[in-house]
Image (cartoon, helix red, strand yellow):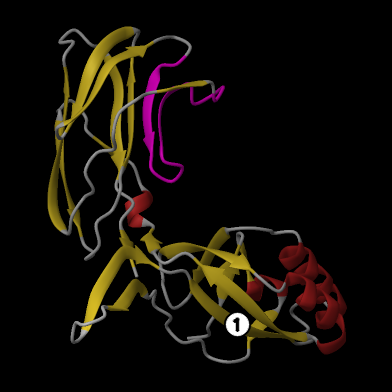
Amino acid sequence: MKQDFSFAGTWLSELGGRIKESPKYEIAERDIELVEIPGRSGDVFLDKRRYKNVPFERSIAFVNDRKQLPTRQQIEKAIDWLGYNIGYKEFRDTLHPRAFTNAILLNASEVIRDLPRLTTAKLSFNREPFWFSDEGQRWYSFGQKNSIKLSNPYQFESDADFIISALPCTTDININGIFYENVTFSEETPTFLIDRKINQIVLINLDTKRYKVVTGGFPLPLSHGENEIIIEFSNKNISLTEVKIKPNWRFL
């Protein structure tokens, strides 16, 4: 199978480019430290409970394939693609089908300078530690029940997103023992949203993006294997219009 990758929504092959060298699997390194203690034999193992970002490279080349654009136009499009996508962008590749991570291109200026002359380049990326499965990005509806069971297929805990929409009312919300008090749904902000990507809990209008911050902690992560998520409301007369969860399954 030909290796390929996508950055910021565009696959290299769409521009007529090719990967010159077969990429290797890169895995995030746990952030740990061995600390020397004077007078104590052996080092103390300090686990910072996080994974480091992963640096990686992709060597690419453009060839004059009659089925594709002329090489000059390929390179012009590639320069636009690589030069204007600054910061973290979605990254996919054929080594991790049906999954994505977020990566930064570090050497865009160098590539833009040399690519027109060489028609080849070595792209230097830096990505976040985890890959997220496409399956974990779908929304699962609670339907008419107050609980749902989801099975996490990966070894790592994941932080889920929640959407709860209701007609105007005030209620306490309990998500697996995490309480949110006096949550007031209104016509202006009819949706309670927990978004772990931006670490925010809000009452929001998803159309206008108007929102109010809600105080409270985040629900417990979803562990490996089966998880039951229970949502309860103190207001028994609440009229729910939507309750759903996006699990965000992840792996290294």
Q: Which residues are magenta?
A: 189-209
Query: Does residue 203 belong to the magenta stretch?
Result: yes
Residue that sits furthest to the front in the current view: 39
* Amino acid type shown at disc 1: Arg
Residue 32 can be seen, yes or no: yes
In the rendered view, does 120 fall on the left or right side of 170? right
> How many marks are shown on the rendered structure?
1
Query: Does residue 98 belong to the magenta stretch?
Result: no
Q: Callout 1: helix, strand or loop?
A: strand
Q: Residue at x 26, y 80 (%)?
A: 38
Q: Position of residue 154 (x, y in %)?
A: 23, 64
Q: Is residue 245 above or below residue 47?
A: above
10 Å crowding of disc 1: few (<14), some (14-19), many (20+): some
In the rendered view, does 85 fall on the left or right side of 79? left
Q: Which residue is mark 1?
A: 58
Q: Position of residue 7 (x, y in %)?
A: 60, 65
Residue 71 can be seen, yes or no: no
* Displayed quadrant of residue 118: bottom right
Towards the viewer: 237 or 27: 27
Q: Residue at x 39, y 74 (%)?
A: 28
